[in-house]
């Protein structure tokens, strides 16, 4: 029996619907397509921030140093970088409809400012029971311990959890930890996928 449904954040609940802000900077700085995202998310500083070993300012400091940006230009880049990100309001409404029959949570590989963002977006507590954030736990998906921790915090067995993530290796990690898991891809019918996994929707 499924008792909890857990969602990744970036790439599932929040997606970059418009790349134009990032593309303008790539053209301005001579970066290849998606090169700016790679610089921001795939750096050693970003990996350290995901594991709670560095602050968000260190990630952006690395970006500024690499691109030789002054503070004002960096602030402008940050605004443009996030400007195309949109919360999937239909998915949020679906998650709310699962409660109180199921516990719901976010399990995210996120930098130390992740909780502030999640609280700003979902602070009314009518959507999620729990946020499990990699930087706070010093663990990152697909490490099995993080999935087990999520189940423990929710007070359920791993086998009683359905997890939704957009990265295949995180989906595989959840399954290895004993959860049912759904690989989110653009256009996926999440409602139908949850139903197929045994969730009443």
Image: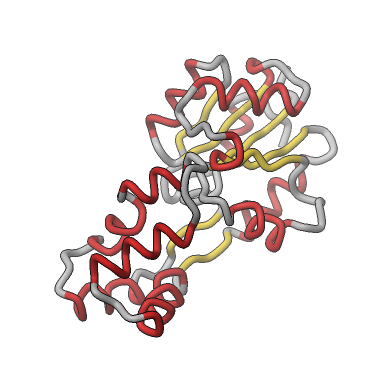
Report the front residue among 175 and 38: 38
- Asked whether residue 103 is in view, the answer is yes
Rendered position, 189 above or below 55: above
Q: Residue at x 59, y 38 (%)?
A: 107
Q: Residue at x 42, y 44 (%)?
A: 48
- Residue 173, percent across and down? 45, 23
Q: Residue at x 36, y 76 (%)?
A: 21
Rendered position, 93 above or below 135: below
Look at the image and tell me in which quarter the N terminus lies: top right
Q: Residue at x 39, y 64 (%)?
A: 60
In this picture, residue 133 sits left or right of residue 105: left
Report the front residue among 111 and 95: 111
Res 178 → quadrant: top right
- Check the image and tell me how it is coloured: secondary structure
In this picture, residue 158 sits left or right of residue 167: right
Look at the image and tell me in which quarter the C terminus lies: top right
Res 75 → quadrant: bottom left
Total marks placed: 0
The residue at the far right in this view is 100
- Residue 182, percent across and down? 51, 32
The residue at the far bottom in this view is 72
- Asked whether residue 190 is in view, the answer is no
Report the front residue among 133 and 16: 133
Rendered position, 199 above or below 39: above
- Residue 59, percent across and down? 40, 58
In this picture, residue 34 sits left or right of residue 41: left
- Residue 37, percent across and down? 32, 59
In this picture, residue 21 sits left or right of residue 170: left
């Amino acid at each position: 029996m499924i008792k909890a449904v857990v969602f990744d954040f970036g790439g599932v609940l929040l997606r970059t619907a418009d790349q134009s802000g990032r593309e303008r900077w790539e053209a301005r700085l001579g970066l290849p397509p998606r090169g700016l995202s790679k610089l921001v998310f795939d750096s050693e500083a970003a990996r350290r921030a995901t594991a709670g070993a560095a602050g968000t300012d260190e990630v952006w400091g690395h970006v500024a140093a690499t691109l030789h940006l002054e503070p004002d230009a960096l602030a402008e880049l940050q605004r443009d970088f996030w400007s195309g990100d949109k919360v999937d309001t239909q998915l949020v409404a679906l998650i709310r409809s699962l409660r109180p029959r199921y516990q719901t949570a976010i399990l995210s590989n996120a930098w130390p400012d992740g909780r502030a963002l999640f609280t700003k977006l979902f602070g009314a507590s009518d959507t999620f029971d729990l946020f499990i954030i990699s930087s706070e736990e010093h663990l990152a998906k697909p490490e099995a311990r993080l999935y087990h921790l999520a189940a423990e915090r929710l007070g359920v067995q791993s086998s009683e959890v359905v997890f939704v993530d957009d990265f295949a290796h995180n989906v595989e990690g959840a399954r290895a930890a004993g959860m049912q898991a759904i690989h989110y891809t653009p256009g996926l019918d999440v409602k139908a996928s949850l139903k197929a996994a045994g969730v009443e929707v």
